[in-house]
Image (cartoon, helix red, strand yellow):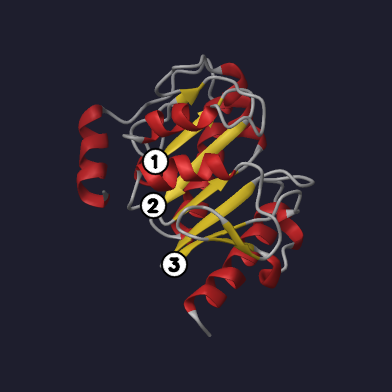
Amino acid sequence: MSEEARLRERLAEHGASLFARGYSVGSAGNISVRLEDGFLMTPTNSCLGRLDPARISKLDRQYRHIGGDKPSKEVFMHRAFLDTRPEAGAVVHLHSTQATAIACLAAPGEDAPIPPLTPYFVMRVGRRLPVVKYYRPGDAAMEPAIAEAARDARAVLLANHGPVVSGRTLDDAVYAAEELEEAAKLALMLRGQPARLLTPAEIDDLLGTFG
């Protein structure tokens, strides 16, 4: 099996798992993966729970559609991360409930709307989680705003929309998106409570050890 074929299968497996657990509903959410000769991306109006590996969109290095079904209308959202962060091998955009709730509560421009409660949140998502101001879904005007936020952040929250998360590999991006959702859930559960946060020194230690 080629690397592209393996990634197509793996993308469909992750999509089905995310959908089954309610991280996306209907045709919400999209995923992209970097290839040596371009990118794979979930098709427009597709359901993450019922992806056909053979029909996943393929784009060339200039993001032109060259195979499979027509790609998501939010290609630009993925391009903002993939071009800004060359180490990113995949991008996951979800409408997961808890993270989207935070995206509705947080002020655009906020830098850390989810506090550093757990080490795995810091390890997978990082120190910063910028909140990008609201844009209509499918509005390409959000691309430069996402790209600017992604310069020193692995993930962003789109105000009143949901998370966009990058990772070195497809697995890394999915795991980070899952960790972000759990961290958002914890933040909402502990809202107003005197929770202990990780200290700056503890955060530095995590990032220095695990990157």
The residue pinned by badge 3 equals 37
Check contact, mark 1 vs mark 2: CB within 8 A. yes
Give the spatial CA distance, label 3 vs label 1: 23 Å
| Closer to the camera in the image, 52 or 16 | 52
The residue pinned by badge 2 equals 88
Question: Which numbered mark, 2 or 3, is in the foreground of this view?
Answer: 3
Tag 1: Cα neighbours inside 10 Å, few (<14), some, or many (≥20)? many
Check contact, mark 2 vs mark 3: CB within 8 A. no
**Helix or strand or loop: what does disc 2 sit on?**
loop
Q: Where is residue 186 in the image (x, y as percent from the top left)?
A: 54, 32
Residue type for callout 3: Asp
| Closer to the camera in the image, 31 or 141 | 141
| Residue 191 appearing in the image | yes
**Helix or strand or loop: what does disc 1 sit on?**
loop
Q: Where is residue 43 in the image (x, y as percent from the top left)?
A: 69, 55
| Residue 120 appearing in the image | no
Tag 2: Cα neighbours inside 10 Å, few (<14), some, or many (≥20)? many
Residue type for callout 2: Ala
The residue pinned by badge 1 equals 154
Q: Does label 2 or label 3 sit earlier along the sequence? A: 3
